[in-house]
Image: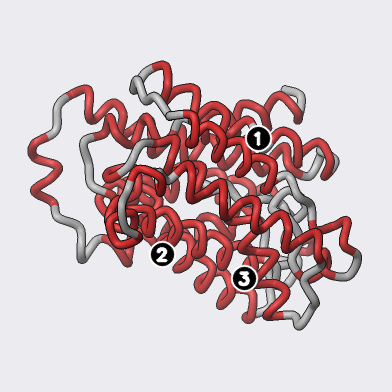
Amino acid sequence: MYPKVKFIISMAIFGSIGLFSVKTGLPSIELVFVRCLCASLLLGAVWGMSALRTKPQKREAIPRREYGLAVLCGVFLIINWVFFFRSFEVMPITVAVSIYHLAPVIVLLLGSLLFKEKVTAGGLLFFLICFVGTLLVGGIHQHATIAEFVSTGVLWAFAAAFFYALTSITGKGIQVLSPLATTVIQTSLGVLLLAPIADWSHFTQLTVENWMYILMTGFIHTGLVFYLFFSSLRELKAQTIAVLVFVDPVVAILLDVTIMNYRPDVYQLAGILLVFIGISYSPRKEGSLAKAAPSFAENGRKPSA
């Protein structure tokens, strides 16, 4: 299969995760636990077979520091997933996805703080465009007070975007450990962290249809898609990836409108447009800042969902 086709398929499936998560009937913590378990089994098997085919003398030594970074990155990733799926429980998929895709802009801002780089006028402008778009798509015009707006659940999506940004920045330090091995470590960590706090009673009230969506979310949206994503990523140019990643939010919004019958008003449509304009900004155009806070497309963008 051509790398570009595999990448498009992975992005399209990522885009449907909101719809599938709603159909599972599981709360966020329990759903993330299932995703981590399924991905650990499937990707762990792939990783194991790959390791067996690699000759010992060709295996590169992994610095201990990278294992620590993989674990820290995994903590951020799991929190990100929990907040992301929680946002689907309290707001329309279109709103949650649009806010969540602020993450690349947050990467830019955090990178400027952590690496002491100056944010350019262009970066600040695109951040403001994203911010205004997010307020509109979140429905701020529909509420009388800020407190009422915040109570709609927008903070869940904002928090998910923030921890996704932390995941991306932390992952920059992992240079030797393979993406597949890193993902298996992170999903296995998710199983260990979430098992003690999962409410198992939620699993006793599920229908056959729920289980179908749960297993598809775990094995297809997490396991298979991660494999397609990583196997195609290194064979594509950064510019190609930067365009194709937009398949993810476009599919999410189309499914929400056609299947979930969500109807954004004119202000929210304007907000979606502003968010797309804002996240199209690429830090690589800003010289040294790109080295500190590259876009997800340039940094081997980790699957958002």
Evaluate whether residue 142 shows in this view.
yes
- Residue corresponding to mark 2: 189
How was this image coloured? Answer: secondary structure
Label 3 or label 1, whichever lies nearer to me, is 1
- Residue corresponding to mark 3: 170
N-term-proximal mark, 1 vs 2: 2
Image location (x, y in percent) of residue 268 = 48, 36
In the depicted structure, whether residue 158 falls above or below residue 233? below
Tag 2: residue type?
Answer: Leu
Q: Look at 77% across and 71% down and name the residue there.
A: 119
N-term-proximal mark, 3 vs 2: 3
Tag 3: residue type?
Answer: Thr
Could you tell me which secondary element the residue under label 2 belongs to? helix
Q: Look at 84% across and 41% down and name the residue there.
A: 239
CA gap, disc 3 and disc 2: 16 Å
On residue 272, which mark appears? none
Q: Look at 8% across and 40% down and name the residue there.
A: 204
